[in-house]
Amino acid sequence: MALSVEKTSSGREYKVKDLSQADFGRLEIELAEVEMPGLMACRAEFGPSQPFKGARISGSLHMTIQTAVLIETLTALGAEVRWCSCNIFSTQDHAAAAIARDSAAVFAWKGETLEEYWWGTERCLDWGVGGGPDLIVDDGGDATLLIHEGVKAEEEFEKTGKVPNPDSTDNAEFKIVLTIIRDGLKSDPSKYRKMKERLVGGSAGTTTGVKRLYQMQETGALLFPAINVNDSVTKSKFDNLYGCRHSLPDGLMRATDVMIAGKVAVVCGYGDVGKGCAAALKQAGARVIVTEIDPICALQALMEGLQVLTLEDVVSEADIFVTTTGNKDIIMVDHMRKMKNNAIVCNIGHFDNEIDMLGLETYPGVKRITIKPQTDRWVFPETNTGIIVLAEGRLMNLGCATGHPSFVMSCSFTNQVIAQLELWNEKSTGKYEKKVYVLPKHLDEKVAALHLGKLGARLTKLTKSQADYISVPVEGPYKPAHYRY
Amino acid sequence: MALSVEKTSSGREYKVKDLSQADFGRLEIELAEVEMPGLMACRAEFGPSQPFKGARISGSLHMTIQTAVLIETLTALGAEVRWCSCNIFSTQDHAAAAIARDSAAVFAWKGETLEEYWWGTERCLDWGVGGGPDLIVDDGGDATLLIHEGVKAEEEFEKTGKVPNPDSTDNAEFKIVLTIIRDGLKSDPSKYRKMKERLVGGSAGTTTGVKRLYQMQETGALLFPAINVNDSVTKSKFDNLYGCRHSLPDGLMRATDVMIAGKVAVVCGYGDVGKGCAAALKQAGARVIVTEIDPICALQALMEGLQVLTLEDVVSEADIFVTTTGNKDIIMVDHMRKMKNNAIVCNIGHFDNEIDMLGLETYPGVKRITIKPQTDRWVFPETNTGIIVLAEGRLMNLGCATGHPSFVMSCSFTNQVIAQLELWNEKSTGKYEKKVYVLPKHLDEKVAALHLGKLGARLTKLTKSQADYISVPVEGPYKPAHYRY
Amino acid sequence: MALSVEKTSSGREYKVKDLSQADFGRLEIELAEVEMPGLMACRAEFGPSQPFKGARISGSLHMTIQTAVLIETLTALGAEVRWCSCNIFSTQDHAAAAIARDSAAVFAWKGETLEEYWWGTERCLDWGVGGGPDLIVDDGGDATLLIHEGVKAEEEFEKTGKVPNPDSTDNAEFKIVLTIIRDGLKSDPSKYRKMKERLVGGSAGTTTGVKRLYQMQETGALLFPAINVNDSVTKSKFDNLYGCRHSLPDGLMRATDVMIAGKVAVVCGYGDVGKGCAAALKQAGARVIVTEIDPICALQALMEGLQVLTLEDVVSEADIFVTTTGNKDIIMVDHMRKMKNNAIVCNIGHFDNEIDMLGLETYPGVKRITIKPQTDRWVFPETNTGIIVLAEGRLMNLGCATGHPSFVMSCSFTNQVIAQLELWNEKSTGKYEKKVYVLPKHLDEKVAALHLGKLGARLTKLTKSQADYISVPVEGPYKPAHYRY
Amino acid sequence: MALSVEKTSSGREYKVKDLSQADFGRLEIELAEVEMPGLMACRAEFGPSQPFKGARISGSLHMTIQTAVLIETLTALGAEVRWCSCNIFSTQDHAAAAIARDSAAVFAWKGETLEEYWWGTERCLDWGVGGGPDLIVDDGGDATLLIHEGVKAEEEFEKTGKVPNPDSTDNAEFKIVLTIIRDGLKSDPSKYRKMKERLVGGSAGTTTGVKRLYQMQETGALLFPAINVNDSVTKSKFDNLYGCRHSLPDGLMRATDVMIAGKVAVVCGYGDVGKGCAAALKQAGARVIVTEIDPICALQALMEGLQVLTLEDVVSEADIFVTTTGNKDIIMVDHMRKMKNNAIVCNIGHFDNEIDMLGLETYPGVKRITIKPQTDRWVFPETNTGIIVLAEGRLMNLGCATGHPSFVMSCSFTNQVIAQLELWNEKSTGKYEKKVYVLPKHLDEKVAALHLGKLGARLTKLTKSQADYISVPVEGPYKPAHYRY
């Protein structure tokens, strides 16, 4: 696929797999709208006043049907939008097609190479004359990374004339980032600094993306205000937990059709994502074993009847392995060598380095048999037995299935919309410094409230006397900041 | 698609969607073999002695990957095999391709018309010169139906010269059956009677197929011995229950990507299939309501915390409706009209008449919008709201997903293999009359035992003294016939 | 406690712990009546016609509050009743007191010795002049045993003059039975034969009691017709399953207050009782391991995510052991020696010989520390660690808690009432021979139906056309005899 | 019971129900020690250095077997201890007896009047000469309340000569508090101020106790440093959640023996306690309906398949009502009037004002029938139907059963020990001001770690490189402060 930008008849740029899938995408977008009451309520509440009038928003977030409803909520509120995916396998091509045709500039397709991925990210941030976006929606933090690395390189270049050297890193992906920045420096040595100047702020929606932001805040490197949407209760305790409870078995079934009941499944990590995965596997009839570093999470697993062991303890007995840690080097090739024939190995944490794909790919004599896209059997020469790796170690729920369902994404994305609104509305007030913020609890509660009606729930109202008794306002927020839900 | 038979280079007949998918099919068959220990154990135990040498087996059973492993177990034991599907949507084309290329005559593809379906059934039974099959594997009973109707028509024709009149029935499908038989009468007025003569027996594997057999037994119409495989414990309490627990959410997710958590789901019928469906939906976080006619099953549902109401009570509040009854006229168009916008309606019972598709299709002004194959939105003119019907009311797990997973099908199909062996081995002994039989308990237990090792289980052995105490042999069978598990 | 019969002011015999608890018993009986809709419906339907007028009923069945409601249903239908418990620990003394005072002759108290137990059984069967009961309700089969052994001894005595020799058996309990019969022979050498003559029939309500009946039927030894109430669906699939799911954790908590979450629990046997126990433990957060001899039940356990191993595999790792097998010699002293300190060992099968209590009691140097009644810690001398044995190895749910709750017992006991009615009504018709029968399905369905209203359920009604389609009457029965639910 | 203090032979004061139960208490304490690894680890780690040497600790916390192990951990670390219960029904008399005889001054028995309760609290705080305790362990905050009210009254008295007027309040309990303080003023007008002077700090362990502390902190009224133990993860996410999941059904079963399966249960409040209760009821087979004021918690309930309605919506249909809110006026007498006959009403939140007991008791014509202690049936005159109220509206798990099991209390109480140690060790450093603190995360993780071995868990160790990647120390703490688990 040649990396050239295409244009719609109205002149909007895009690069998608197949624009003819737009009709199909539109049908599914319409179905999703019914399942995303939070976003639709935002359109109803804020649409008339067009609060994003004049705002340019760049988004780096899995280009799915649900994201399409998010994008069209942003445009319905007046924004101009450019978009790329934040994972090479997660794009739903019919969603990308519908958005490209109807609503926003999109640079994303399922099965990008890493080069194509970062090309798309760069396109997404490039608004031509006048610098970059006003706001960014950055799921895993790759857009933020590119801007920060770009600014760093430009400053270094200005000071010392040195350009980034892709050979300075072993990391295949970071090589590409450095290459892009190096090449950009030649044409415009202040591109990323202009971007930074314009940028009002960004919001990040995954544990991983947020972790990067806090690290930058700590070192003082953060170049703009950021809202940590991931740690809204209505995000992390819903999307991460219930979303994965839904999408893990979905991905397993679509990729392998394997019966989960009766199997031994190992879930590495028992955070919100791990809790959702373990619950799904247990409910489907698997015997679930958890690995954990944190004694508190380990004790939670035990209270749910799950065994807590190390990966080494069970590597040769289990049938299904899922990584959910947000850490790296969880399942190494040396583990994989010891697994049972046709053991399934997959990752539902944000990055693919939870599984040692490099070690696997470079294992002497290993043979890769692609059953179907995103489902590979890797056969080891010593035993002639194989393991099945999903989505090449990347997010299996997006690579092998369609990600999280609309309803739970509506919770997450309503947080994104509210965060973007907050940043934009306060752009001149100085309320937000170059730090990481979370949304105030009353907005978190509002997001939840917008999703109750669809499920037929009826809330109880506090009386004034009851509210006083527990020292909260009648309309909330109802809980102290440290409350854990 | 023109209905002409094709031939492999070796001369074997077939009609499939695309023979080039055979390699993909073969890869998935190889994966499935690892998950089907019962069938593989049959190959190991019986393969060497070739017990089916000389036997012709015709099968009418969903042409999936798992069925491919069944077919190749039958051929590994010496049989010659012809196959058709027993549902117009349930064929997996890559499975059909692999079998057609490598192992048996197949007439099946996903998305047949009813005419094509019955054409395939007829092809499957037609072994050319020398009559029909020696044995039939008949899941839902359609092959059995065709033979019985054929014989009846031939006898009537011989007696009175009258041929079947397709216009004598309102049932669209039965019209086709009568047409086929009528047309066949012209070329060979004793075809089905010759078939009957040769036929040693058949085995049936669904509640529906078995019900038909018992009805025919009762009226004395049954033309050959039949083994009711459905009521092996290792079939009905596994395939029906755990298979559907797996495949119902799989079908829902693939077809609609809808979040199950938080939804109100109605399961019509709480037999084995209904129990599996209700368990899956409850575990996924839905609130499940059951409809039942049988007070015992209703009380079971209540003991599991499920509400038992009538469809009328909940039709306008629920989000998901699943029929599992094996009965007809469960969800009528008048119900569907009252449902919420985008309520999902689907059937996982054997036949599509659980849902009033005819009523829906002929509803004045109704509009059908196909989201994707097997997922249709039907919009009612009065409300302009729609419902989503899966697989056109047919088996949604096979139409929208890939049916039951290999492991549980291994239980079911090992019963089929054992039943076929039993019929064939006893063909000359008179052991089996023109009645319906179930497999003896020790064979049922054997099927289970063949599946334990794969899951790492270790059985306890009775001592002689213990066995005497409970009056069973040390090696089983361990339970009286009436035991319910 | 001297074994002398006491009498109420009206002259009715009894022997209970403390008649002054009758008021408390009455209050709890009144609560239970609200929870036992099946029995109350029997009173409403049959009470006016007094069908048991003139019938003497002897019952050997745990003398609990629920049994009190059963007894008073029998008396409300016109019967005269005598009662004993069928377990030395299972009597609820306040229930016994209320019945003794108000309704029937009772010989039962919590904590009987074995001698007292069999004395009570004999009293229960002894109706004075005119022989024994017309009908017996015999849970575990001890009343039936006594009659059969009595008749055998009388016939032997008449033939040979030989009396039973208690020293001929090692079984402590059977020694007592033989002693009672021997002593009885002296005063009346045809007592049990007269009893047999009068007896119309009996009903049995546990797996164990029923097993004995079938063994006697097989050898032709059965002296009267018997109805197997245990295998009514509304008994075995409710009482055994849901009753134990309720009462196992109840007994564990009352006896030990131990936290179940996080523990490793071994359930020996995965029949209906084992399924209920395993479900309860799993839901409470334990990790459950099942032992099984039957591959089918083992495979069911695996499908629910439970590990299947042998007792030897896990004896030193588990925290809780429950026997549910109905067999003997399941947990031997040699197992108990290897258990962790304070491992809990208990039995919920009918008889105490599932646990090797004799081996434990006679283990050299073992020390018994009674924490509280029915909760003993046994300390082994080698390790100075101990295990906790509940209810001395007898039914822990009745010994340590109050048995099954009223609602599920209402299902079981309504079957008992209907069985007794059936035997009595058909006493002169010859319908029932000296065989074991189960209740017809329409009565089983009726029992279920009587319990739906209390739980707010609404049944769906078949149309005539639907009923014809599935070949059942509109009013049921709805399932074939072999259906497993 | 006359309120006079008794003394052991060694001169230690106490007031308990029956000292002869001390042996029984000791046996159960020894069992509990095996289940409380956190406390036993504290004894092993800190015992030798006697860190509490010279410290006086007063505790107001349910005087149960588990608390006995806590008390003896404090004394094993060198403290001198006085104790009272924090609920009139929660004392286990055998536990109190064992502690009174062996370890500490105890003033507590099951079934205190409110006067007796506050007398016990006063005794607990009264260390004779030299003022009060150095440290207090205050579960619900009553000891803290008494001190604060006492100081307030003394200051007012000194300033104005006015003494507290019990008639100034309608609250029956607060009347007693004022009376005690008023009477104390006469004998020593600076008693509570001396107490305050000496007091190093306190720790509180319930949502309710902590809420009071934060309110006092907010108004500046807090007289000493306090550690909020309730909000340790290893407390609120374990004790509140898993403890109640265990003890709610335990209390229901012991009090009523009612079958939970099939019932409709309403859980008011879906915080940690409500989540535990709802999980237990659902798993036991009830249909659970939640009432909530907080949209986030409501959405969590929906995701678990629970219906969210208002109490008014379901008051006449449900069988079981549980309050868990920590608020007041949840179930009013007007609700209770509308309930079904024998509906069960109980509270598992800290205070009894969740249920309108006053309204019930004073309802015209209402009749109270005590089934057994803590289980009352209240009959309304209009309908002659009744409801069953447990533990007079107080904590049903402690009133009707034995509270939370040892293992989970070990988590909570290890937090208490660590908090007390922290306050005592830092008493001269000024680290803790008159504010409310939570324990640092590494101590929280330590508490969890101390409980893993008992359950056979094996933690995974981070590599240095992994730790760096996620920016945490190899030894933890592993999560940011805002992490919700």
Image (spheres, coloured by chain):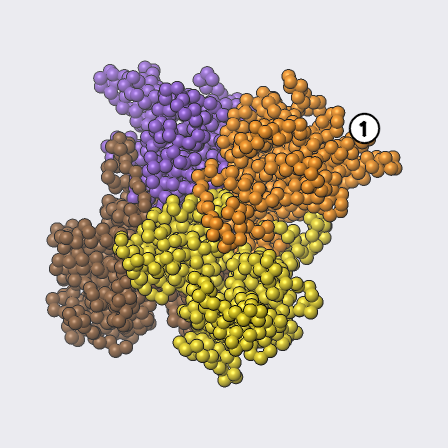
Chain colours: A yellow, B brown, C purple, D orange
Q: Report the residue that reaches farthest toward the front.
A: A160
Residue D184 point in image, percent of width and height: 79, 29
Q: Residue D423, image x and y in percent?
A: 66, 37
Q: Position of residue A327 (x, y in %)?
A: 47, 54
The single residue placed furthest to the right in the displayed view is: D160
Q: Residue at x 58, y 36 (%)?
A: D413
**Which quadrant is home to the N terminus of chain B?**
bottom left
D331 with respect to C217 (left or right): right
Chain label for disc 1: D
Residue D356 higher or lower than B163, as above or below: above
Q: Residues within 10 Å of mark 1 (few under 14, many from 20)?
A: few
Picture residue at 50% right of the left edge, 47% below the top: D474
Residue D74 appearing in the image: yes
Label 1 is placed on what type of residue? Asp
Residue that label 1 marks:
D188
Compared with residue D308, is residue B181 higher up or lower down, i.e. above or below?
below
**Residue B274 showing in the rendered view:** no
Question: Residue D155 versus residue A138: which sits nearer the camera?
Answer: A138
Determine the secondary structure under disc 1: loop
Query: Above or below — where is B34 with respect to C166?
Result: below
Residue A358 picture location, percent across and down = 38, 59
Q: Is residue C194 left or right of residue D43?
A: left
